[in-house]
Image (cartoon, grey):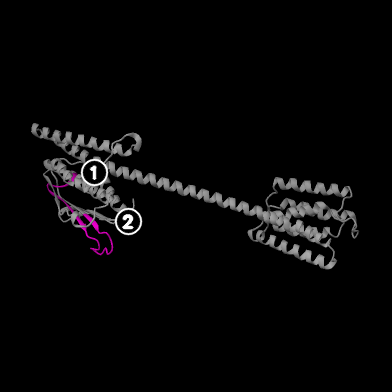
C-alpha cells in the first residue's frame, strides 16, 4: 500500500524556500544560536535546517510526520552551533500540526507542550538554581506551547465559523422548504375553493345547455336558459368573491363572508332548481347542531358546507332520478369512544345510483379529492362509494379545535 501525498501548497513552497534561504544567510554570516558548542563542525547545523525546511512542504498534508521530524531536527540542532531559522521553522511546524492535524492531535498538543514547558522550567531551576534558569522555561514555552496554543485558538475559531455557516445554510434550507410547503398548501386551498365555488354553477349550466340544445321545445329551452342565466350570474358573483379573497387587505376589496351551515337551506333550494329537469329532489335531514354545546369551529363549518356543496354538484352530474338526502349529525363530547374529546360532526349525503336519462356533465374526480383533503386536514375520516342503491358520501369531522391542522 503506497502513501499518496498531494503536491505541496504554493504558500508552503514559498515558506520553505524563504526559511531555508534565511537560515543559509545566517550561517554564512556566522550568526549562530549557540556559537560555543564545538562538538561538530559548523556546517553540521545545516543538516537540521535543510531537514526542517523540507518538512515545510508537507506541513498541510502530513502534519504528524513533519512534527516528528521537526522535533528530532530541533534536538539535533542543540548539539551543533545552532541556527535561529531552524527553531523558527519548528515553531511553524508545531502550529501547522495543530491547525491541519487530526482533531485528537489538535486537542493533545497544547496540553502536552504546556506540561513539557512546566517540567523544563522546574528542572532548569532545580538544576541551575539561578533566576536565569527561568529563561529556559520561557524559551521552551515560546518554541512549543505558544505555537500550539495559537494553532488551537485559530482552529477553534475556524470550526465555530464552519458550524455557524452550516447552521445558517440549514436554517435557510428549512425556511425554503417551509416556504415551498406553504405555497403548495395555499395553491391546494385555492384550487379547492375555486372548484367548490364554481363547479356547482358550471355543472348546472352544462346540463341545462345540453337539454336546451337537444329538446326542441320553446318552453323547455326558455326554462333551461333561465336556469343558465341564474347560475351564470351566481357563478360570476362567486368568482368576484374569490378574487376579493386573493387581493391584498389594503386594496379596498370587500370583506368576503365564509360560508357556514346556515346557508345549507339556500344551497339545497338552488340544487332543487337546477335538478328539477333531471327528476332530482333534495332533502335536508337530521340537522341537529343545536343539541351539542358550543358553536362549531369555523374550519369545521366551512369543510362541512363545501363537502355538501360538492356532493350536490356530483348528484346533479351523475345521480339517477330520485331524492338526494343530506344528513348532519353532531356527536356529543365523549360519545362514540371519543372520551374526553369535543365530539364530531358527521356529514352524510346519499344520491340515487343507477342509469340516468338525459344529458350528463363530465366529471374529473377533482371533487372527491378536494372533499378528502378537507376532511384529512381536520384529522377526520372520509369515504365515498356505492351502498346498495345509493352513492354515499360520508365525512366525520372532529369538532375540537385541536384537531384543526390547516
Query: In the figure, 143 relative to 175: above or below?
Result: below
Identify the mark nearer the N-term, 2 or 1.
1
**Quadrant location of the N terminus?**
bottom right
User: Which of the pair 116/128 is nearer the observer?
Assistant: 128
- Where is mark 2, residue-wise? 402
Q: Which mark is residue 363?
A: 1
Find the residue positioned furthest to the top: 218
Locate residue 241: give its quadrant.
top left
Q: Residue at 66% of width from left, 52% of height from top?
A: 154
Left or right, 167 with reference to 300: right
Judged from the image, the secondary structure of the residue bearing numbered disc 2 is: helix
Left or right, 30 with reference to 318: right
Tell me if residue 221 is in the magenta stretch.
Answer: no
Instruction: State the image coordinates of residue 376 (x, y, percent, origin top left).
Output: 30, 53
Locate residue 143: give its quadrant.
bottom right
Judged from the image, the secondary structure of the residue bearing numbered disc 1 is: loop
Q: Residue at 33% of width from left, 45% of height from top?
A: 188
Q: Which mark is residue 20?
A: none
Category of crowding for the residue at label 1, using alpha-carbon neighbours closer than 10 angstroms: few (below 14), some (14–19), many (at least 20): few
Please indicate, yes or no, whether residue 84 appears anywhere in the rendered image: yes
**Marks 2 and 1, how far apart at CA:** 35 Å
> Answer yes or no: do the residues labelled 2 and 1 have beta carbons within 8 Å?
no
Please indicate, yes or no, whether residue 62 appears anywhere in the rendered image: no
Q: Which residues are magenta?
A: 317-346
Left or right, 80 with reference to 113: right
Instruction: State the image coordinates of residue 342 (x, y, percent, origin top left).
Output: 27, 59
Tell me if residue 332 is in the magenta stretch.
Answer: yes
Category of crowding for the residue at label 2, using alpha-carbon neighbours closer than 10 angstroms: few (below 14), some (14–19), many (at least 20): few
User: Which of the pair 196/255 is nearer the observer?
Assistant: 255
Instruction: State the image coordinates of residue 137 (x, y, percent, origin top left).
Output: 78, 61
User: Which of the pair 233/344 is nearer the observer?
Assistant: 344
Of badges 2 and 1, the one in the foreground is 2
Amino acid at each position: 500500500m503506497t502513501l499518496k501525498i498531494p503536491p505541496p501548497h504554493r504558500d508552503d513552497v514559498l515558506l520553505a524556500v524563504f526559511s531555508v534561504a534565511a537560515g543559509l544567510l545566517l550561517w554564512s554570516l556566522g550568526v549562530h544560536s549557540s556559537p560555543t558548542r564545538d562538538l561538530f563542525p559548523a556546517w553540521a547545523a545545516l543538516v537540521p535546517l535543510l531537514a526542517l525546511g523540507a518538512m515545510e512542504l508537507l506541513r498541510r498534508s502530513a502534519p504528524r510526520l513533519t512534527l516528528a521530524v521537526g522535533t528530532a531536527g530541533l534536538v539535533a540542532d542543540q548539539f551543533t552551533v545552532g541556527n535561529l531559522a531552524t527553531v523558527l521553522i519548528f515553531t511553524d511546524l508545531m502550529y501547522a500540526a495543530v491547525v491541519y492535524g487530526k482533531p485528537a492531535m489538535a486537542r493533545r498538543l497544547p496540553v502536552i507542550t504546556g506540561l513539557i514547558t512546566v517540567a523544563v522550567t522546574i528542572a532548569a531551576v532545580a538544576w541551575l538554581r539561578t533566576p536565569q534558569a527561568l529563561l529556559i522555561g520561557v524559551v521552551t514555552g515560546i518554541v512549543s506551547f505558544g505555537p500550539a496554543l495559537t494553532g488551537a485558538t485559530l482552529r477553534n475559531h475556524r470550526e465555530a465559523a464552519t458550524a455557524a455557516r452550516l447552521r445558517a445554510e440549514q436554517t435557510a434550507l428549512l425556511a425554503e422548504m417551509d416556504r415551498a410547503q406553504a405555497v403548495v398548501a395555499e395553491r391546494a386551498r385555492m384550487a379547492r375553493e375555486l372548484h367548490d365555488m364554481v363547479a356547482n354553477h358550471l355543472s348546472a349550466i352544462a346540463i341545462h345547455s345540453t337539454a336546451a340544445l337537444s329538446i326542441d321545445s320553446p318552453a323547455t329551452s326558455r326554462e333551461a336558459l333561465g336556469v343558465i342565466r341564474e347560475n351564470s350570474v351566481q357563478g360570476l358573483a362567486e368568482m368576484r368573491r374569490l378574487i376579493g379573497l386573493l387581493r391584498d387587505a389594503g386594496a379596498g376589496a370587500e370583506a368576503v363572508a365564509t360560508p357556514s351551515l346556515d346557508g345549507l337551506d339556500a344551497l339545497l333550494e338552488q340544487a332543487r332548481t337546477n335538478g328539477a329537469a333531471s327528476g332530482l329532489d333534495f332533502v335536508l335531514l337530521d340537522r341537529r347542531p343545536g343539541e351539542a354545546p358550543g358553536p362549531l369551529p369555523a374550519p369545521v363549518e366551512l369543510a362541512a358546507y363545501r363537502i355538501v356543496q360538492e356532493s350536490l354538484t356530483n348528484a346533479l352530474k351523475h345521480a339517477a332520478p330520485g331524492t338526494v338526502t343530506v344528513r348532519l349529525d353532531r356527536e356529543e363530547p365523549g360519545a362514540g369512544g371519543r372520551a374526553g374529546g369535543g365530539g364530531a360532526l358527521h356529514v352524510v349525503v346519499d344520491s340515487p345510483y343507477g342509469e340516468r336519462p338525459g344529458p350528463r356533465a363530465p366529471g374529473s374526480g377533482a371533487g372527491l379529492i378536494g372533499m378528502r383533503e378537507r376532511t384529512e386536514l381536520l384529522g377526520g375520516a372520509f369515504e365515498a362509494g356505492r351502498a346498495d342503491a345509493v352513492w354515499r358520501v360520508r365525512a366525520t369531522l372532529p369538532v375540537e379545535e385541536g384537531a384543526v391542522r390547516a
